[in-house]
Amino acid sequence: MLKTQTCGELRSEHDGQSVLLAGWVHRRRDQGGLIFIDLRDRWGITQVVVNQETAPEAHAVASGARNEYVLQVKGAVRIRPEGTANDELETGAIEVVASEIVLLNAAKTPPFYINKEEKIDEVERMRYRYLDLRRPRMQRNIILRHKIVKFIRDYLDERDFVEIETPILFKTTPEGARDFLVPSRLMPGHFYALPQSPQQLKQLLMVAGYERYFQIARCFRDEDLRGDRQPEFTQLDLEMSFVQREDVIDLIEGMMIELSEKVAGKTPLIKPFPRLTYTEAMEKYGSDKPDIRYDLTAVDVTDLAGKSGFQVFVDNAAAGKPVKVIRAPGLLRGKEDPTKALSGEGLKRLMKELEDLIRTTGAKGLAWMALPLEENGEVKGPIGKFFTVEQKVELFERVDAQAGDILLFTSDKRETVYEVVNVLRRHLAEALGLVDSDTVAFCWVIDFPMFYWNEEEQRWDPSQHMFTSPVPEDIPLLDTDPGAARGSQYDLACNGYEVAGGSIRIHSRELQEKMFPLIGQDMEHAREEFGHMLEAFEYGVPPHGGIASGIDRLAMVLAGEPNIREVIAFPKTQKGADIMAHAPSEPDPRQLEELYLRVVVPEEEQEQ
């Protein structure tokens, strides 16, 4: 080894020991006869002192060293002189007095700072990802991810789960997103698909009698990207036999609590995790993955608003469209001086900003009412005059309104109202400083609709996937009213993200075959696509259920990061590109010839 200790382990008890360190120059301070170098590796930083008088050759090497040079340092550990200890470093009580320094490798000046946090253009970060990954914050994230995965493996192993790998090259199946296809050289014209998840395979493992399976699985989906989504991702995949919903929920909740506390050092805000039905989540938060770190819940005031003098509310209430209110606490107060209320242009700009925001959801407008700061002040807002004094008193009591609050009203078709509530909650939470990235708040969402109606295709779409079992008492509804049936589905949300989702599965061929016509598949096509599953269901299938948790997204939440690219070593950009390696790239024509493929460029691209 080129080192006897890491740069993060030396303490006062090592005083006087001879050590050999190796790492990168984090910072260098030249004081003439003395040069101080902060030497960094992934375990930490150690201060190295180089004295020209006692170690002239080492001093000469240190004089030429620059940030990110790779050095080997031989020297003795000593307690730092009184008054010079650095409490911000774990090694801050000591320093290493260098006797020899070897330059292992020089370095060009990096395109951005590695030794301090600053805003860096993401394209530059992706282009030089190997340098970006050197930064302490990124190393903390990647190591946290490693610890999360190790904890999960140990936790499940202790509970008799078996880790089993499933194929990466599999059969294309309709599971909600587009597949990535891989051509077969040995079978021209045939293609494998990269798995969107191991769903079918883990159910077949239950047929095979393994009872408790898990896998840290690589999954692939060719879909539009965003901050919490990548084309290739890693998930905890898990399946259990002879279980009901409560068994899976109890296992995962226990794991998430221990994982948060022991690995991330964050105690969940609420234990045990709250449970919301899908309907409750949508009505209160406008989302089936609500962020419950803050309140800002929507309150239904359809009955009250429908009796007001505001015709839009009256007409909507009569048409069955809800009227909901979100109370924005203290939003009327000025930022510079909270004792004064926003007025004039300031208030006008605020409401214009909020109205522009909610118009992105398709909503037509935003009504509002503001409670004055002073005791006898007038209620502000264009709709205040349409409510009687008695109606206002009832309204304020219902939403628990306080001085300086602004009440934001939305009314439209129910789906649009949900979107407005979700968008407003997220925006207001940031604006009011209610979001704490160091806090984690989990909640379960249960009793999802089994299906959503697809108006364009005139068929039902499964809310999760076609292998999810209906709630047992709702099975008869598949024949009479599929839209009213609930799925045996359960999602785990944390800080506004879905971090796990699963269900109790169908384990009867008869029930599984009933699903295909509902989702617009004829039985001949279904048997062609899923014949292996249907045949397996004839050989004694145990009742079973499972769950999958996105490792990337979970690591992102526990690290307090804004997107999953911050916890993936080599992620893709929003366009699915690897800027560093220039992927995707054009294949060699000989490769296409071997695979019997030809690239056809669309006419519009040929013209460009």
Image (cartoon, rainbow, N blue to C red):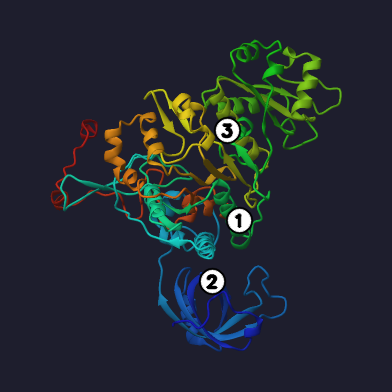
At 67% from the left and 33% from the top, the residue drawn is: 297
Snapshot quadrant of residue 44: bottom right
Element under label 2?
A: loop
Binning the other alpha carbons within 10 Å of mark 3 as few (below 14), some (14 to 19) or many (20 upward) gives some
Q: Quadrant of the N terminus?
A: bottom left
Question: On the image, which quarter does residue 344 sit in?
Answer: top right
Mark 1 vs mark 2, CA separation in Å: 30 Å
Image height of 49 relative to 493, above or below: below
Direction from residue 217 to residue 525 in the image, left or right? left
> From where the camera sits, is residue 209 visible?
yes
The residue at the point 64 percent across, 56 percent down is 266
Residue 515: percent from left, percent from top: 39, 34
Question: Nearer the N terminus, badge 1 or badge 3?
Answer: 1
Q: Secondary structure at mark 3?
A: helix
Q: What residue does disc 1 label?
A: 254
What residue did someone put label 2 on? 43
Q: Is residue 30 visible?
A: no
**Would residue 508 appear left or right of 186 to someone viewing this image?**
right
Task: Please name which of the two marks, 1 or 3, marks the residue nearer to the observer.
Answer: 1
User: Where residue 123 sits in the image (x, y, percent)?
Assistant: 42, 49
Position of residue 348 relative to residue 433, above or below, is: above
| Amino acid at pointer 3 | Val
Q: CA distance from mark 1 to mark 3?
A: 31 Å
Q: Secondary structure at mark 1?
A: helix
What distance separates the C-alpha of mark 3 from that of mark 2? 41 Å
